[in-house]
Amino acid sequence: MEQLLSMNLAELTDWLKAQGCPAFRGKQLYEWLMRGASFEEMTNLPKDFRAKLAEIATANPVRIRDAFTSKLDGTEKYLYELEDGNLIEGVLMRYHHGNTLCLSTQIGCRMGCAFCASTLEGCVRSLTPAEMLGQIIAVNRRLNGEGRVGNVVLMGSGEPLDNYDNVMKFLRLMSDEKGLNMSLRGVSLSTCGLVPNMYRLAEEGLPVTLSLSLHAPNDEIRRKLMPVAKAYPIEDVLAACRNYVEKTGRRVIFEYALVGDMNCEMAHADELAHRLRGLQCHVNLIPLNEVKERDALKAPTAAQVERFMKRLEQRHISVTRRREMGDDIQGACGQLRRHTLMEENGEWGMGNGE
Ligand code: SAH
């Protein structure tokens, strides 16, 4: 089946021609696709044309299978089903300045970070551009006019720079002025630090914010948490960040998950501040979200988070603590998909999924 959402208008029109369909239908079809319509709903297109399309193509390969709304802050968590039955998840965060959707770029992940739930069973496959765009379109449709997805963070499951070409195509599709016409300034691409592709990204001419998952002030600690640190030393990662700032003029965001007894000492804050000196950046502290299967890793105490943050401020590092949203709906990090898969396989008793 051809995934029509992977094409821009010109590509869709060419594809229609190649199928022997009238090319002038391209624009109408494209507009319907951007709204998340099914072929049946495209009522201003001839019936036989729609029937033919339905045989060979899909309108949106992403379907919202379940949705949970947080009573605390209105955050919505989605479980999506793809055409091949695979499940991915997403989170819609509602801020005063608009809606931010957290997108997945792969089914699972192969980076193996020690604290992360998405990587526990490895990577099933990468998502297509249509499957990334389709997440936005499915959520816009669900919002049904009451707001739209404005900002996008590539912080769901998967490593975006491990699915480089599809992610670049997706970014160009979402910002296409004939399509969703979204601003890439509202996109944060989060990476564990695949250095060669960080340099490539800096050359793409796309004004996205680079978020770098640092999580440690030095290689010794970083290697304990992130296998990727064995391939790319922290100084190489930071050099790639400096290059990104130089090439794009945009500051880099460092994500730092605070893990109790691992990386929250004052000495770690000092070392981090020292390393980041002179780099145009912002540090986002994330108290570890404990993952059941990773029970050796513990969240820090509130006091530890406070002290770490203060210390960085004293060292003139711009820093915030990430707000925890949707705490009552498994808002975080690949845990919903996992719970659902386990329940379906009978490995997980009901009512146990906290
Ligand atoms: N592969 C990308 C995107 C992953 S998820 C990356 O590595 O950046 C987005 C962020 O959530 C990353 O910084 C990731 O390290 C972090 N994260 C994953 N699991 C977490 C957990 N259990 N607690 C806190 N942060 C976590």
Image (cartoon, grey):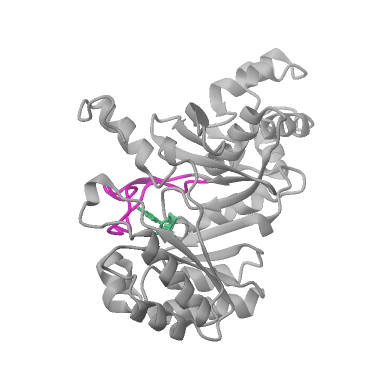
Give how far across and how far down residue 110 sits, in percent. Answer: 32, 55
| Whether residue 299 can be seen here | yes
Q: Is residue 104 magenta?
A: yes
Instruction: Give the quadrant of the C terminus.
Output: top left
User: Is residue 335 toward the left or the right of residue 350 in the image?
Assistant: right
Residue range in magenta is: 103-127
- Residue occupying the far front of the picture: 303
Give how far across and how far down residue 1 sits, in percent. Answer: 50, 30
- Residue sitting nearer the eye, 60 or 92: 92
- Residue sitting nearer the eye, 182 or 260: 260
Q: How many marks?
A: 0
* Residue at screen point 55% across, 26% down: 56
Q: Hey, which quadrant is residue 217 in on the image?
A: bottom left
* Residue at screen point 50% across, 83% down: 315
User: Is residue 194 toward the left or the right of residue 42 in the image?
Assistant: left
Q: Main secondary structure of the magenta part?
A: loop
Q: Is 331 located above or below residue 217 in the figure?
A: above
Q: Hey, which quadrant is residue 148 in on the image?
A: top right
Q: Is 67 located above or below residue 293 in the figure?
A: above
- Residue sitting nearer the eye, 318 or 347: 318
Give how far across and how far down residue 319 sits, in percent. Answer: 53, 70
Q: Is 239 located above or below residue 283 in the figure?
A: below
Quadrant for ligand 1 reads: bottom left
Q: Is 176 located above or below residue 3 in the figure?
A: below
Give how far across and how far down residue 180 sits, in percent. Answer: 71, 43
| Whether residue 233 can be seen here | no
Q: Is residue 59 magenta?
A: no
* Residue at screen point 59% across, 34% down: 139
